[in-house]
Image (cartoon, grey):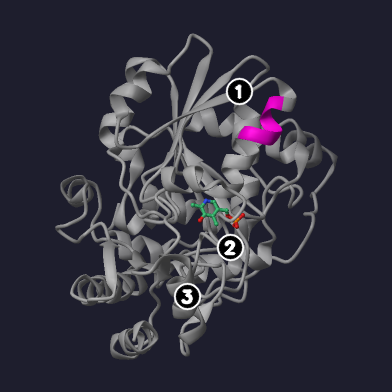
């Protein structure tokens, strides 16, 4: 195994007879067989080969192989979106009667899946606060099959002790699943801390330029086999075109993340000293309540900064209306910096109480810090605050 950056650049599944230097794109729905015996043996899975793109495709395979190396995983499957990865992974593993124990602060659509849809098939969930993992352990029942978590969280930028949660999962023989979208494998590799499966929305920092939707799950070969069997039948596979975009994007993940994190830390430090800001949250600020844990499990603090504008909802809205350069958008992990106001947008359907549980106050702002020059990012936020 070479270094992370080298594997991200040099992992290449195959070259065609043209010996192209860059990654070829296999835009094909199916593959041909040499003869009847080849066809029979392929379908019997006596040989490993591509049959149909719903099952596998060389371009998708390259993307999967790269992410497996980056996460230290045995096997993986690529999906059309992050949510397709979340749903298919869970649906492949649970049965009626099973219980999922999940962190409360998780991606909104994942929360809705647990609360509104999985119960249709008799799968229940309960939630724990990420700052009290002992209380989490007490929620485990004989029906519990999976522990599910994210770190850092969206949009609160809270940090969860993955190693400790991994130990709890192991002690109770539970499948530990981590959505590692915010950190990316460059900053954090949950398998080292006991995760069995790692999920990503490739839409965010993996693509990094806001172009495609994608998702991926990687992890132990036996669990991934179940995910693969389910997914090749139900059809959530990633398009080879998007896989090609992603596999090229991963070549620059490390250099992009270095700059994202450098910019985010500078912005967080600027905001900490600003009189119109009541608090700032960034994993690599000493003031972050989980700073020590963040330092232990992450290489740098990530690209997301949360803060609160003094003056509540009104001040928050005024801040947003004054932003000139940054984008008001729901995406994150883009080269273009994005500001969002969770209380009036992504989390507006939650009660004030539920929002507070997810770390969102009325004046909370989430910045996905991009790759523009930091002076311009800070200048825009500074003028909007004043
Ligand atoms: C965006 C996101 C997802 C869902 O990914 P899509 O590609 O939008 O389906 C899941 N988890 C986290 C943490 C996300 O940020």
Sequence-first tag of 1 and 2: 1
Graded by Cα atoms within 10 Å as few (under 14), some (14 to 19) or many (20 or more), the crowding at tag 3 reads: many
- Give the mark toward the camera: 1 or 2: 2
Magenta-colored segment: predominant secondary structure: helix
Graded by Cα atoms within 10 Å as few (under 14), some (14 to 19) or many (20 or more), the crowding at tag 1 reads: many
Tell me the element at label 2. loop
Sequence-first tag of 3 and 2: 3
Above or below residue 132? Residue 63 is: below
Sequence-first tag of 3 and 1: 1
Tell me the element at label 1. strand
According to the picture, the residue beneath numbered tag 3 turns out to be 338
- Part of the protein shown in magenta: 115-119
Check the picture and name the quadrant holding the C terminus.
bottom left
> Mark 2 near ligand 1 (CB under 8 Å)?
no
Above or below residue 338? Residue 83 is: above
Q: In front here: 241 or 174?
A: 174
**Mark carried by residue 124:** 1
Q: Quadrant of residue 44?
A: top right
Disc 1 to disc 2, C-alpha distance: 27 Å
Tell me the element at label 3. strand
According to the picture, the residue beneath numbered tag 2 turns out to be 345
Disc 3 to disc 1, C-alpha distance: 35 Å
Q: In front here: 311 or 102?
A: 311
Above or below residue 8? Residue 79 is: above
Q: Is residue 53 left or right of residue 335?
A: right
């Amino acid at each position: 195994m070479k270094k992370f950056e080298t594997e991200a650049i040099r992992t290449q599944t195959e070259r065609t007879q043209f010996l192209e230097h860059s990654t070829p794109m296999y835009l094909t729905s199916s593959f041909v067989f040499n003869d009847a015996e080849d066809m029979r043996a392929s379908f019997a899975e006596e040989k490993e080969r591509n049959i149909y793109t719903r099952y596998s495709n060389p371009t998708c395979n390259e993307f999967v192989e790269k992410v497996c190396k980056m996460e230290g995983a045995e096997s993986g499957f690529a999906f059309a979106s992050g949510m397709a990865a979340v749903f298919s992974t869970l649906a492949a593993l649970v049965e009626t009667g099973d219980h999922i124990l999940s962190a409360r602060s998780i991606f909104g659509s994942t929360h809705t899946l647990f609360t509104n849809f999985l119960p249709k098939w008799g799968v229940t969930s309960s939630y724990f606060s990420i700052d009290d993992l002992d209380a989490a352990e007490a929620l485990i029942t004989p029906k519990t099959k999976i522990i599910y978590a994210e770190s850092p969280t969206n949009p609160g930028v809270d940090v969860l002790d993955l190693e400790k949660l991994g130990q709890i999962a192991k002690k109770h023989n539970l499948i530990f699943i981590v959505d590692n979208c915010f950190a990316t494998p460059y900053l954090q590799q949950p398998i080292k801390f006991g995760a069995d499966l790692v999920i990503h929305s490739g839409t965010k920092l993996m693509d990094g330029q806001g172009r495609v939707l994608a998702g991926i799950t990687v992890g132990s070969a036996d669990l991934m086999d179940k995910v693969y069997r389910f997914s090749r039948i139900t059809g959530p596979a990633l398009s080879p075109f998007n896989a090609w975009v992603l596999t090229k994007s991963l070549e620059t993940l490390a250099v992009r993340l270095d700059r994202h994190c450098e910019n985010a830390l500078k912005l967080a430090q600027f905001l900490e000293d600003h009189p119109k800001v009541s608090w700032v949250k960034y994993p690599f600020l000493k003031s972050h309540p989980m700073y020590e844990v963040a330092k232990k499990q992450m290489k740098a603090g990530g690209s997301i900064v949360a803060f609160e504008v003094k003056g509540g909802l009104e001040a928050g809205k005024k801040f947003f209306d004054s932003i000139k350069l940054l984008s008001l958008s729901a995406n994150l992990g883009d080269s273009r910096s994005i500001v969002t106001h969770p209380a009036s947008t992504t989390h507006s359907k939650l009660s004030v109480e539920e929002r507070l549980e997810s770390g969102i106050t009325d004046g909370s702002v989430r910045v996905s810090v991009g790759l523009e020059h930091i002076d311009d990012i800070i200048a825009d936020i500074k003028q909007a605050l004043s």
